[in-house]
Image (cartoon, rainbow, N blue to C red):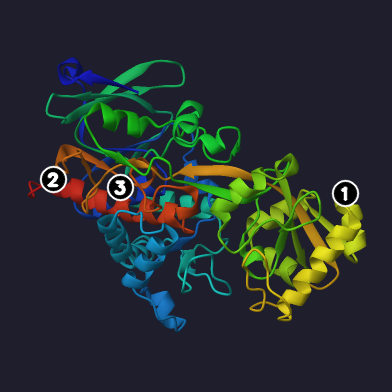
Amino acid sequence: MTLRPAAELGEAPGVSLLIVGAGACGLSAALAARDAGAAPLLVERDASPSGSTALSSGMIPAAGTRWQRAAGVDDDPARMAADIQGKAHGQAEPGLVETVCAEAAPCLEWLADRHDVPLSLVEGFRYPGHSRLRMHAPPTRTGAELEGALLQATERAGIDLVTDAHVTALFADDAGRVHGVVLTRPDGSTETIACDALVLACNGFGGNPAMVRRYLPEMAEAEYFGHPGNQGDAVAWGQALGAATAGMSAYQGHGSVAAPHGILITWALMMEGGIQVNADGERFSNEHDGYSEQAVRVIAQPGGIAWNLFDDRLLALGREFEDFRQAEAAGAVRHGADATALATACGLPAAPLAATIARCQDLAAGVGSDPFGRDFTGQPALTAPFHAIRVTGALFHTQGGLMVDDRARVLRPDASPLPNLFAGGGAACGVSGNAVWGYLSGNGLLTAVTLGRIAGRAAAGLLHGAVN
């Protein structure tokens, strides 16, 4: 993760546009650059591109899409921006929020219509903080399918992709212009590539324990559910070049990772009537606040675990998700004909668990009020038989990074852009404010695809002599 003088580059072979990272951000950037007439080269540290995208649920929020209109959903970018800022307590950078919200719908329709990425509106439930149905995803609702579709699109577009190529250093001059990179191969050999423009799409720092301890101390001992390659390279290079960073204490957590199976369990179960209980058989929070902040709450419970509790109606909903089906096949789902039987299956105290379920049934009927502030009246009451999954909280990906403008140019502290450096996705500052509770469902993929597309277009414009 070093920065080397441009003079050391020598007569290295070169490309016009180099994109570091082949997740959703890098692939979107490459497709946009190719559409704009550039010839990008993608470099990926892994043998097979996956990254944070493949680990996600593959859901991207967008407002005002043709899929929403077909479903009768009235939505627009301003409403989406208000939802993002509402979740972030107004701490997200306003210009960046406006940019990605305005870009989201055109970006998804471009991916679907021009590049055959299979996307549709996810109906039936809304994630916490979204005032409209606006999640769009591939058929299996998995990030692996999204990643695969984007990779196929880049192959059809004739975009070159080099794998097993870990960028370990940048060559730059005193003005902050990047002239090339060092690639390190798995056998330790290195090669240099010159470039006229560089897009950083290599995600955040969740896999770097030292950075996590520095910026996210409450998650220092938490399970990391992200890609191990997220080592903070982009942040380190940007800072060395004099770039500004923001939102470094923001991140996406998740309070619903099956333990010990390590499989993400959809939060749709909670939004549609499910509950979480701890080892004492008691609820401990408002599950509708959001799955990100729930990570910290679950970790704070005895043993750092909780149980997702649901019924047959929600079991059917869960089975619509590939990850859930995998968890069920792995034996993660436990069953009980009634509360007592479920308690036995899970090793929980029977009387408290039965009392918790009974209280939630009363709340669903409009009797009493929830001490945690959740409204249970919008969904049917849980009914026997019951089911449960043992889960823990985890760190998924970081939301802080390099400051960028509305053209995805990396900025200095005085808001002036570096000459030829662009960033998006986890490499750039996100729209989640400054804490775990600021993460609105889909924020990660939202900035990945939108800033990726913007960066690809802007880099191509720079190469073609457009004003930058």
- Residue 361, percent from left and from top: 77, 74
Q: Nearer the viewer, mark 3 or mark 1?
A: 1
Image quarter in which the N terminus is found: top left
**Label 3 secondary element:** helix
* Labelled disc at residue 55: none
Instruction: Confirm whether residue 320 shows in the render.
Output: no
- Whether residue 389 appears in this view of the structure is yes
Residue 456 placement (x, y as % from top left)? 25, 49
Number of other residues with Cα within 10 Å of mark 3, as a class: few under 14, some 14 to 19, many 20 or more: many
Alpha-carbon span between mark 2 and mark 1: 62 Å
Residue closer to the observer: 307 or 444? 307
Residue underneath mark 3: 30
User: Which circle's residue, 3 or 1, is located before the other in the chain?
Assistant: 3
- The secondary structure type at the circle numbered 2 is helix
- Name the residue located 72 percent from the left edge and 75 percent from the top edge: 363
Kind of residue indicated by mark 3? Ala
Kindly identify which residue carries mark 1. Answer: 347
Q: Residues under labels 3 and 1: Cα distance?
A: 51 Å
Per the model, the C-alpha gap separating discs 3 and 2 is: 15 Å
User: Of the residues shown, which amino acid type is indicated by label 1?
Assistant: Gly
Residue 447 picture location, percent across and down: 36, 53
Q: Earlier in the sequence, mark 3 or mark 2?
A: 3
User: Is residue 105 shown left or right of residue 292?
Assistant: left
Q: Nearer the viewer, residue 438 or 39?
A: 438
Task: Give the x, y percent position of residue 433.
Answer: 39, 51
**SS state under label 1:** loop
Tell me the residue that label 2 is attached to. Answer: 462
Compared with 65, 398 (above or below) is above
State the residue at coordinates (17%, 17%): 10
| Label pair 2/1, CB-CB below 8 angstroms | no
